[in-house]
Image: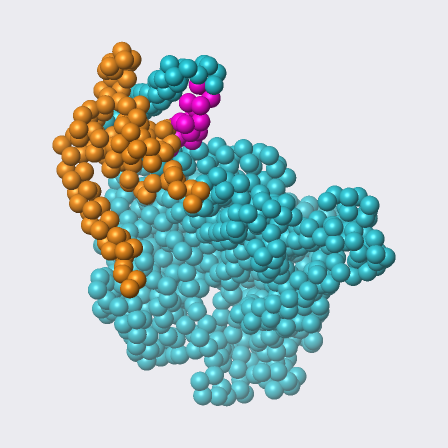
Amino acid sequence: MPDSKSRDLFPGALEMMILRLLKQEQMHGYALVQRIQQASNNLLQVEEGSLYPALQRLLKEGLVDAEWGVSATNRRVRIYRLTPAGARHLTRQLSSFARMFQGINLVLEMGDA
Amino acid sequence: MTLIDRLLRRRRIYDDLSSEMQAHLEERIDDLVAQGMSHDDASAAARRAFGNVTRLTEEARDPWQWPMIESFLMDLRFALRQLRRSPAFTTIIVLTLAVGIASTTTVFSWTRTILLDPLPGAGHPERVEALESTTESGRPIGTSWLDFRDYGKYLTSFSGLTATYPTSLAVGDAKQSTLRWGELVSANFFDVLEVRPALGRFFPARLDSVPTPVVVISYDLWKSRFRGEQSAIGTSMEINRYPFTIIGVAPRGFHGSMPGLDLQLWIPATTLGQIVPTGGWMLQDRATRMFRVLARIAPGVDPAVARQEVQRFGALMARANPVESEGVGGVLLPLWRSHLGAQDSLRAPLLVLLGACGLVLLIVCANMANLLLARAMGRRREFGLRLALGAPRRRLVRQLLTETSLLVVAGSALGLVCSVWLAEALPWMIPTFASPTFTAPRFDAGVLMFTGGLAVAVTILAGIAPALHGTSGRVGEALNDGGSRGAVGAGAQVARLRGLLVGGEMALAVVALVGAGLFHASFRQASTVSPGFSANQVAMGSVSLALAGYDSARAYGFMSRVSDNLRQQPGVTAVSYTDYVPMSVSEGSWEPLRVEGYAPQAGESMKVYRAAVGPDFFKTMQIPFVSGREFRIDDDSAHAPVMIVNREFVARFLGGRASIGMKVNGWGRWFTIVGVVENVKNYRLTDPPTPYFYVPMRQVYRPEYGYTFVVRSTLPVDQAAADIRRAVNAVDPTVPVFNTMPLEAYIEVPLRVQQAAAQMLGLLAGVAQFLAAIGLYGVIAYSVAQRTREIGVRIALGARPANVLRVIAAQAGALLAWGLLAGIVASVMLGRVVSAMLFAVSPADITVFASAALTMMLVAVAATSVPALQAIRVDPAITLRDD
């Protein structure tokens, strides 16, 4: 399929990935994009800018917070951190996502025999 | 957090966001350059990878927006821009809406003043109803003081009953007096209406038994005459030349008990003896039914129960007082349906007008929906593009509705401003000489809410369909086939909807035309009826002798001296006077009679309406004699009582025989008939011939209603009217003169309401026609524009202009046909509702219907002709090259 590297993730997927990455360590937006691409073996071509609406939504919900700081490469960047609420949210999301994924798999791998 | 804090905080969030995104791009560019790209390539690649900055910024800001206000403001700005771009469209919608809203709001404000909110300033007015007496024929009349006292004593469904007699009062001294309107009321008047004084106090209960000359004045009178000073309380005020003490000021906004009318003075009913020489006697006479009774239904009592009690008790009182009250009944009515007052003659015209305004407003809505639909179809390309770019449809619908509401708000605001001004025109509906002035309709929360409600209804009615249709349809469709020519599927659907709307507009316009036509025809019929006398070249002027405190002897001398004075004026050919001017707003007085040789049938009423007149009355009024003679100056108390009767009196009571010399008993005396005159319309032009009789004023002196001089002159009638004023002043300057005017103007009053209603309906029908024409023009012009190509092909293939015209005519004709049909059906149904208000015109009058249909057809032809002419001028060479 030509669009196998579709940029359209399902709603909430990007947010979930952001939260998951921030759980490991705090980082700024550009680093988040790099990490998503690395971690997914470049399978996910996230439109880089789409990170920011997602981050703003998370900020609004209080799942992350942000602070201006200086990056490893000595740039003035805005560094995001997971809040306790964000951590709880992530746990819930992951388990419900796992259930959904399991369900979809069961359907997709239905024995044809 | 204050709004400013929030705004500042948001500004910081947005700033952070932009710098952050900018930093991201820079970091990416640096990385790419580090990987060996040129700076320009890196910059382009970084932007590509990042996506559309503007869209993303907007999306990222989204969580921080206050969704309603913010996007509404954006929509609003956009809508304003859109509307500015098409000024003609905007102007037509705003102006037509303003007309619709202004007329509806104006008539509503009148209706509210007269019918819906008849007792401003009173507490819980919805529990106050009118208690009326009825004659045996069911005609509503007033209630006598004694009957009122009995009602008050025995009825149990009410927490209080009050009696009022609205009348004009002469306020001032011997040198100068002004005529003001007030009410003689029972002592509990303000208690029953639940009104608290603004200053001083109201009437103590003992005033119903002990006549005390005290007066309560209106707030406005207090402000204007006493400059709002506290010291007004306790001062003396001469009313009908008798000193009254001011004891209280009514609260602001309280105008008395007459719906819509502005009354200024309230005095105890028991002081009638001071106000009018015969007043003391009038309070003691059970047959003098001069009071209006207002009753407050007790808490918890069902009005239906109260109504029954009044009816039961009314019948009981008729049995208890058979001499005065045989056949008289009692009835309880909501104030807006009560008969004594201006509301009685205004009720029907107001409701008809309100209906007509609603009709016009509906047409305005249809027209607006139509124009908006056309516009939305024209913008399908724009919407298609926006949908393709990912704008949610909901957003577009909201955008369109914002535009619609903007139009509606502008139109409503303009309409409201106009109606504040138009509302002043109420007196034009019913001239208020011989009655108090109208209170100005109030533009308060109630009216604003009404107009606001209308605006919301208009937005929904006119806006929803265009918004949904404009944004429907598949995206590709709108983009592919050129957009402006319209998609076939959705386009056809919208065309059908527009056709339906235009047909509906025409149907409603036909209804408006038929309504206006019926009322015009009715008015014309009524105004061609001859009243039986000649008002042409007659001036009138009324005097109130009671107000000047005259007894009968002084009154006779006064009337004679004024008459003599008038007779000497140049141009005057005849002078007389009467205590009842024909075609007045009230019916005058009646007297129970016994006619020699006539045995009334069981239950037959012998109460006959009458007038007490001066010598030469019939000569002045040019009422022809059948036989006998005119009253003379010596038909006075020193000579035998005489009477003149009308032709119908003779036919009914005297078997049509020669009647001169026959005897009739009234006022306990025997009168000899000395003359028979032709029938005259005494009350309404529409009344059938009714028995009527005349007595000499010098033999029956009843000053309480005043006397009116009538003067026939060969000179301009205004001059004769001025002569009356001058003559009265010359004889006694303390006698108040009022209603000096041409008799013709006075007798028009009953017709005036009809005339005003007919004119206003005509105006509304004109507006309706105009709107329907715009609608039809819009639809035909649009379809011609759409089919330019088709028409071009037809012409290229040899179609002649006639063929093209036929196609267009067929389309317009189909719309017209359904509009006419629906309109006529609706008119026939509505005609039944108004038939009772029409005089000598059938609600299915064929002329009216035919001319309405014809007018509509002419308007339709005119509206179609412009686009039709455009169509036959289509140049195939140009249209075909277009593709």
B669 to B803, vertically: above or below: below
Horizontally, residue B595 falls left or right of residue B524, namely left
Color used for chain A? orange
User: Is A72 on the left or on the right of B132, as rendered?
Assistant: left
Residue occupying the far front of the picture: A113
* B727 w.r.t. A79: above or below: below
Task: Tell me: residue B443, above or below residue B161.
Answer: above
Q: Position of residue B484 (x, y in %)?
A: 63, 45
The reply to whether residue B4 is in sight is no
| Residue depicted at x 44% and y 75% | B138
Tell me the quarter of the image containing the N terminus of chain B.
top left
Magenta residues (range): B42-61
Give yes or no for residue B828 being in the magenta stretch.
no
Quadrant assignment, res A48: top left
In the image shown, does B362 or B625 lie closer to the viewer?
Answer: B362
State the hue of chain B: cyan
Identity of the residue drawn at 44% across and 48% down:
B456
Relative side of B95 to B851, left or right: left
- Identified at 48% across, 72% down, the residue is B591
Whether the magenta-drawn stretch holds residue B60 is answered as yes
Q: Position of residue B324 (x, y in %)?
A: 38, 75
- Residue B140: x, y in percent? 44, 69
Give the x, y percent position of residue B232.
Answer: 32, 35
Q: Nearer the viewer, residue B12 or B410?
A: B12
Quadrant where the C terminus of chain B lies?
top right
Q: Quadrant of residue B125?
A: bottom left
Main secondary structure type of the part rendered in magenta: helix
Can residue B159 be seen here? The reply is yes
